[in-house]
Amino acid sequence: MEWTDEGILLSVRRHGETATVVSLLTHAHGRHAGLVRGGAGKALRGLLQPGNRLKAAWKARLAEHLGSFTCEPADAFGTAWLHDPLRLAGIAAACALAEATLPEREPHPTAYEGLVGLLASFEEADWPALYVRWELGLLGELGFGLDLSRCAATGTVEDLAFVSPRSGRAVSLAAGQPYREKLLVLPGFLTGKAADPGEVVAGLALTGYFLDRHVLGPQGKRLPGARSRLVERLKP
Amino acid sequence: MAGAEIERLIQLLSRLPGLGPRSARRAALHLLKRREALLDPLAEALVDAAAKVRTCSVCGNFDSSDPCAVCADPGRDRTVICVVEDVSGLWAMERSGVYRGRYHVLGGVLSALDGVGPDDLNVERLVARARSAEVTEVILATGVTVDGQTTAHYVADRLAECGVSVSGLAQGVPMGGELDFLDDGTIGAALRARRPV
């Protein structure tokens, strides 16, 4: 078995003295683990950092084996932001979340392209809003997409202000007012309005609720600590 | 093939870093052949280390005294604390012979994969030390990895209210380094940290 693909490095774990087991989110092969010989050595340590995009060749005798990767650099998305606490927290959160949520060896090209787009967007000032959109996209990719297009109660597309925690559908301000204590806040930037930095945390609370309830909770997992640290950093 | 004692020795040796079952077998045989010159002194040294070596209650270093020799040394600069991930980092700094301050061993880095959170690290003790009047600077010498720098930023945040200056080790081209062999991240860091010549 042998293939080559592009992938974003999600996690690295040391294996023995010199090798590492890495997990990549690849374009055509999904989240895939493999051994990197010499991965703990000087030459590869800088390359094998979460968030970096790699050109990877995977090889194994049988498809079900762990196999081994040989990696070459493509884009240093991860190591480019080591000096910036907020962006670094964003990269760590995105990689940890993709690692925790995406099934292994199941192709998710949309998730891969979404993550590449997110990592490339860290150059921009409004990347936190894009991060929330990426988590919404991830929910959709995993089959738990939210319907934020119209009000679940009235059908209106105006003044959408809440999300039902049960159905994941938007609710308008008027229809949701009597139940506002039970509904989740829908930040305006997710319905096409201009992004307000203060609303990003509300957006993360929204996606975090559904990720926890539908994706991680049933597997006995919790939202990664890296994501919680990102939320803490984004709080005004 | 070998007695139970020898098998146990081989099994324990094979759990040491850098030794597999085959090399552990060779090491055990080597020790048994040189009983007086190697095996007995090694056994004594191991018993001694197990009985006497403690974790320093101040910085987290390993030593036979508590506080450790570094913390107890009156010749050390008491105004500076260098924060390292592990004792191996402390030993590396000491090997360089350049740094004359004191240390603080965190005991790891924040890691989403291994489930290491802030409560698992020796941060509270560092904050308490940094609050003392004599400390003026904390140098963060965690690894230049995503986890290492995430930890450094977290520690820097925690130290913000302690009234000490917080610095990090420089990143860039290593001694004897050539640009052609450097990765993009290192070149980027070196460019950001450029200085007048």
Image: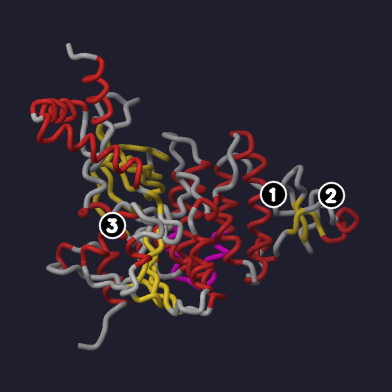
Q: Nearer the viewer, mark 2 or mark 3?
A: 3
Label 2 resides on the chain identified as A
Callout 1: few (<14), some (14-19), or many (20+) C-alpha neighbours within 10 Å?
Answer: some
Q: What amino acid is at disc 3?
A: Gly
Residue at numbered disc 3: A46
Query: The disc labelled 2 sits on which kind of residue?
Result: Ala
- Check the image and name the residue furthest to the bottom: B196
- What whole-number distance in Å separates the C-alpha atoms at marks 1 and 3? 41 Å
The mark lying in front, picked from 1 and 3, is 3
Measured in 3D between alpha carbons, the distance from the residue under mark 2 to the one under mark 3, in whole angstroms, is 52 Å
- The residue that appears at 36% across and 46% down in the rendered structure is A12
The picture quadrant where one finds residue A73 is bottom left
Is residue B160 in view from this perspective?
Answer: yes
For residue A147, the mark is 1
The x and y percentages for residue B164 are 48, 78
Magenta includes A118?
yes
Whether residue B98 sits left or right of residue A186 in the image: it is left
Give the labeled residue for mark 2.
Answer: A153
Residue A59's x, y, as percent? 25, 34
Q: Which residues are magenta?
A: A117-131
Tell me the residue at 35%/46% (across/down): B52
Q: Is residue A140 left or right of residue B156?
A: right
Badge 1 marks a residue whose secondary structure is loop
Does mark 3 fall on the same chain as mark 1?
Answer: yes
Instruction: Name the image quarter holding residue B114.
Output: top left
Q: Confirm or deny contact between disc 1 and disc 2 (CB under 8 A).
A: no
Q: Element under label 3?
A: loop
The disc, 1 or 3, on the residue closer to the chain's N-terminal end is: 3
The chain letter under disc 3 is A
Callout 1 amino acid:
Asp
